[in-house]
Amino acid sequence: MIHFENVGLRYGMGPEVLRDLTFDIPKGSFQFLTGPSGAGKTTLMRLLFMSLKPTRGLIRMFGRDIAVIPGEELPLLRRRIGIVFQDFRLLDHMTTYENVALPLRVRGKEEATYRSDVIELLKWVGLGERINVLPPVLSGGEKQRVAIARALIDQPEVLLADEPTGNVDPPMARRLLNLFTELNRLGTAVVIATHDLTLMDRVDARRMILTEGRLDIHD
Amino acid sequence: MTERAASSNGNRGRDNPKRDRLVSLRPMAPIVPPVNVSGHALMVVIAIMSFLCALTLGTVTMVQEKAEAWQGDVSREITIQIKPDDGLDMEAALTEVRNVALSFPGTLSADIVDRAATARLLEPWLGEGFDMDELPVPRLVIVTIDETAPPDFAAIRQKLSDAVPAAVLDDHRAWANRLISMARITVLIGVGILALMFATTMLTVIFATRGVMAGNRHIVEVLHFVGAETSFIGAEFQKRFLLIGLKGAAAGGGIAALGFLLLGAWQSNSMATALNDQVTALFGRFTLSGAGYFGIIGIVILISAMTAVTTRLTVIRTIREIDRQRADPSLAEIG
């Protein structure tokens, strides 16, 4: 589904922050992306989300070479990917419900067709009582769960989550992990970027370890 | 989790309709937030610039109409002056002159300025109650001509010199031409000022809109990343900013139009007062024609449209910047 081949990336004239990355994200797979701070995890997540182009190498997303995809087609391709940003990127003027419904709304769907789905998903991530609350009132953990729900709402083929448990307590982290594994069981490929070893120990999944821009994969 | 699993089979939410009905939701918030502080500031900027623009347009329209009226008045009339002379029967001479004028084709009417009217004309210089018989006061016959087919002025002059040698015809051509030139220059200057005002308004609106849009960049980014197409994002922002532009421009243009209406009404209702006379002498009449009001409506529409188009272009530019960062990682933040 996603294929990286000898991918390298540098910012400007600086050194390569990612070097010779070659891997696949198969359909329905589950993997953790880990490594020390500054190793390039967020950069790799951005490559996976197509918000960056590599300076060398080949990336194929859903069978298409991203180097030749025209800009106007990117939104349509991104609809197949759910992303949880490290900084959440929620819209402050929208309630929890409205933020989660946003991906469906921009696809032109009628509210009546997704209302119950959004409410159910919010209950599932433990935000059933916070449906009408605006993001500035939410705690960090709650914002994170809203961001996760927004990424999941359209049942993406791939879920990319950058430090999704960074702002929640251990019980909630376990709950969110269960949510990701359940989603994976339903067929969605999951890539979770995290530092949390305890979290990784809870799931028997592939580990992609980034060290100084190089990737080691432990299946 | 079982609920979630069930949802994947297409039954999500439908197995618990009662429970969903209990959740009350507010009406969906617009994708672009309603007007915030910077949106209000933009609206005020648009209102002020529209007001100034409408004021300039109204003034230029009035000057142009006034200049056209002057030209019309001047070219419609000629005067025949009879200088008093020993042995001249002024009243008979006036009648003779009028008859001569009326005998030419192209002359519509000829009116003798009577003694009372002549006295009124001289009143500013000679004061009230002077005796006209004690002074050699010339008398006038005002002749209205057909502008499209004017009479032969040379022939009138010739006939007048035969009939009443003391009569002198003034066809106003010399100073009418000067007045027309002056009026044209005045209108040209007015149009120049209007063009500058308009350019300033457009630039101010464009930069103010861009400024406010910069504060909405995060919304454009989020929408772009959740899969919204550029046309969708552009349309959403355009809708919101068209409303801001329309409100601001309508307020500014409306106040200017109301100002012209009130000033015109005040002038009409306070005729012959000292203040009104002074204001009219200085600025003329503040009556704006239908064309002037249509011009103001045009300004409102144009400024609103400009705000909306600028918004759309800014959205497109923002998305291009995001894509440029994608293509050139050195422009992106290091992660």
Image (cartoon, coloured by chain):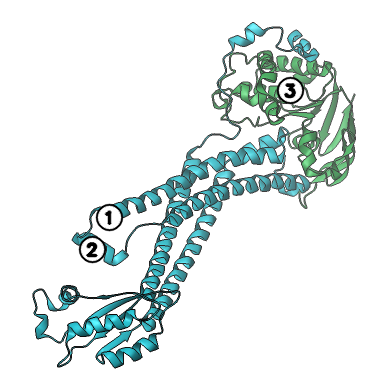
Q: Is residue A2 left or right of residue B235?
A: right
Asked whether residue A18 is in view, the answer is yes
What secondary structure is found at the residue carrying circle 1?
helix
Q: Is residue A74 above or below residue B5?
A: below
List the residue tagged with mark 2.
B277
Front residue (pair B49, B56):
B56
List the residue tagged with mark 3.
A152
For the residues beneath circles 1 and 2, the answer to whether they share a chain is: yes
Q: Is residue B317 above or below residue B160?
A: above
**Type of residue at label 3?**
Leu
Marks 3 and 1: which is nearer the front? 1
**Type of residue at label 1?**
Ser
Asked whether residue A165 is in view, the answer is no
**Type of residue at label 2?**
Asp
Name the residue rendered at 65%, 20% in the picture: A168
- The chain assigned the colour cyan in the figure is B
